[in-house]
């Protein structure tokens, strides 16, 4: 409501609006900046200190696509480059409308994928495991560990999202060819999914270890029973 009423109606690069936008970033270390774009796609409000240099990394084609959306749902971009930082980000945006329902612009939050990569590095998935933050169309926003070209995996990952939601399946990604047991889960109301994959070899090695331990324990128990009956 604040962005709709003040972000659009206030004078461009209003310091009061910039201060309010910066307040929205407090407690959200994954967010780099918030911009308000007018109906033509120009940045008119921004949380960054150097507002005069503020620009959007979204292409005009992407802006037009977002403006055409009438659902009011959040939209997620692919990876973008903020050259001034320099930093790779992805954009979470939604359209703004006037009281009469006419398009008024966009509000865009730029999110740092490195924040999620650091978080995923703390999760143990084995030497050949992987964790990915994905758009629903299979586009990788974050992959840990990173690969040189995750774009080659998009079609396979999109299929995994469609068929393996909340249940594991076996798959190998074209980028590395490692056979993994993969499970995907949607992220709340966002058009996002998380995929976690553990290599089949490591999973089977752990399973074999559990089986051997169980067999050894069973043998000891049966041996104790045998000795008890012999006494």
Image (spheres, helix red, strand yellow):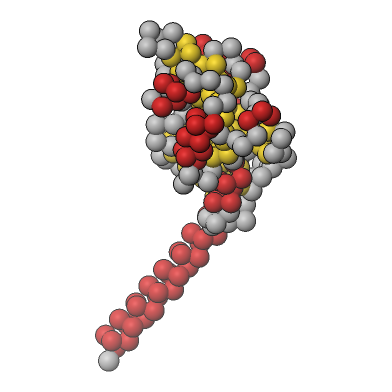
Identify the image quadrant of residue 97: top left
The answer to whether 47 appears left or right of 219 in the picture is: right
| Residue plotted at (33% across, 83% down) | 224
Q: Residue furthest bottom?
A: 231
Q: Position of residue 149 (x, y in %)?
A: 71, 36
Residue located 45% across and 70% down the image: 213
Locate the C terminus and report the quarter of the image it occupies.
Answer: bottom left
Q: Is residue 159 depicted above or below 38 in this figure? A: below
Measuring from the top left, give residue 34's x and y in whole percent. 54, 32
Instruction: Give the residue displayed 51% in from the left and 61% down from the top.
Output: 206
Question: 103 above or below 79?
Answer: above
Residue sitting nearer the eye, 119 or 225: 119
Q: Position of residue 218 (x, y in %)?
A: 38, 72
* Residue at the image point whose x is 66% and y is 37% from the top: 88
Residue 92 visible to an observer of this rendering: no
Question: Quick one: 146 or 169, which is closer to the camera?
Answer: 146
| Figure quadrant of the N terminus | top left
Percent position (x, y) of residue 42? 61, 18
Q: Quadrant of residue 167?
A: top left
Between 199 and 115, the one nearer to me in the picture: 115
Q: Is residue 170 above or below residue 91?
A: below
Closer to the camera in the image, 157 or 192: 192
């Amino acid at each position: 409501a604040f962005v709709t009423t003040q972000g659009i109606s206030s004078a461009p690069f209003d310091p009061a609006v910039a201060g309010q936008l910066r307040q929205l970033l407090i407690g959200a270390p994954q967010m780099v900046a918030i911009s308000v774009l007018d109906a033509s796609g120009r940045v008119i409000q921004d949380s960054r200190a150097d507002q005069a240099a503020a620009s959007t990394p979204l292409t005009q084609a992407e802006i037009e696509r977002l403006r055409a959306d009438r659902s009011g749902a959040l939209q997620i971009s692919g990876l973008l480059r903020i050259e001034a930082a320099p930093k790779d980000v992805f954009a979470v945006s939604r359209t703004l409308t006037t009281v009469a329902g006419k398009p008024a612009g966009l509000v865009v939050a730029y999110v740092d994928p490195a924040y999620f990569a650091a978080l995923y590095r703390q999760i143990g998935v084995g030497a050949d495991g992987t964790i990915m933050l994905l758009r629903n169309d299979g586009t990788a926003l974050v992959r840990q560990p990173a690969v040189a070209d995750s774009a080659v995996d998009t079609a396979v990952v999109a299929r995994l999202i469609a068929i393996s939601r909340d249940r594991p399946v076996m798959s190998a990604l074209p980028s590395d060819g490692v056979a993994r047991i993969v499970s995907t889960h949607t992220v709340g109301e966002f058009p996002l999914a998380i995929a976690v994959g553990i290599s089949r070899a490591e999973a089977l090695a752990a399973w074999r270890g559990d089986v051997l331990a169980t067999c050894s324990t069973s043998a000891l128990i049966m041996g104790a029973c045998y000795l008890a009956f012999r006494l």
